Amino acid sequence: MTNPTKPLPTPGSDELKDVLGNHENRLIYEFLYSRRDDPPTMAEVRAHVASQLGEEHEQTDRRLRELRRHFQIPAKRVGSNRFVYPLLGWETKQKRLHKGISSKTEAMVYEQYGYRCAMCGKSPKEDGVKLVIDHKIPKDWGGTDEPENLQPLCLEHNHGKQAHFASFDAHKDAIRRAIALDEVHLRIGELLKALEGVEVPVDLINLVAREENRGDPTRRLRDLRALGWEIGVTKRKEGKRTVSYYRLERYAPWPPEGPGARVAALEAARKARKKNR
């Protein structure tokens, strides 16, 4: 049963962005919204995503399942082997959908990491530590119980991470809107837009960037400046560290092909000019 007192969010609205931080999730929702009178098949949903993103996206089916955490989108049989997916309304039993992590999923995550802490590599067998399942992106910030968002941590690093993340809770809404976006430039840029005029510490930018092995926020910020953004920087001595804070002063619209593609094109053009000198 849908909730008649709460209208569905309209495409492009801030309400929709608050609920669905991921661009592709919003893309699918907006397609379903536009087809409320003529619900599409899964093949049509996949084709629409492919036409918008330029290629078939392997996560489309999973994204639709994620939408069902917030909205009623049943699979409705309309023929012997044909199903359509109508967008009916808000999911009124949303709390029941946030179930605990199953023991099967826990076992899979522990095995994937070799029964070791994802941060320090210690194991119960060799080091006597206790491991717990951690959400890489906290659920309060829009994280899910999907295996790719889970990792084992020893108690020491789990408590340390909780304390570190708690220091950013004042910006929880801004983080939630940015952290699940598909491109690193979008994640950093949307965080800065949500906190426009506020000095954002580099640690928070790193956290939202989610580039664990090759992250360089200063390079990504240079990329945004190349796209016409104005971003100021202030450095402060905090204990033994010098911490950089970045403040968005002006931003430009996102290029239609996406910031990553535009940055790559600008870099290719720069190298071509350098080569021809």
Image (cartoon, rainbow, N blue to C red):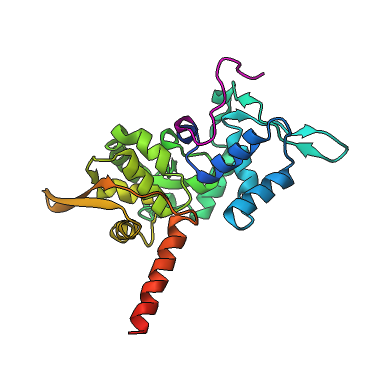
Q: Which of the 4 image quarters holds residue 140?
A: top left
Residue reaching furthest to the top:
5
The one of 93 and 13 positioned closer to us in this rendering? 13
Residue occupying the point 25% across, 51% down: 231
Q: Horizontal and vertical percent for residue 224? A: 34, 56
- Whether the magenta-drawn stretch holds residue 274 is answered as no
Decide whether the magenta segment is chiefly helix, strand or loop: loop
Residue occupying the point 75% across, 36% down: 84
Q: Is residue 100 left or right of residue 203?
A: right
Residue occupying the point 42% across, 42% down: 137
Q: Horizontal and vertical percent for residue 147? A: 54, 46
Using the image, determine if residue 261 lies above or below residue 39. below
The one of 153 and 246 positioned closer to us in this rendering? 246
Q: Which of the 4 image quarters holds residue 72?
A: top right
* Range shown magenta: 1-15
Assign the N terminus to one quadrant of the image. Answer: top right
Assign the C terminus to one quadrant of the image. Answer: bottom left
Q: Horizontal and vertical percent for residue 247? A: 23, 46
Q: Horizontal and vertical percent for residue 12? A: 50, 36
The one of 113 and 260 positioned closer to us in this rendering? 260
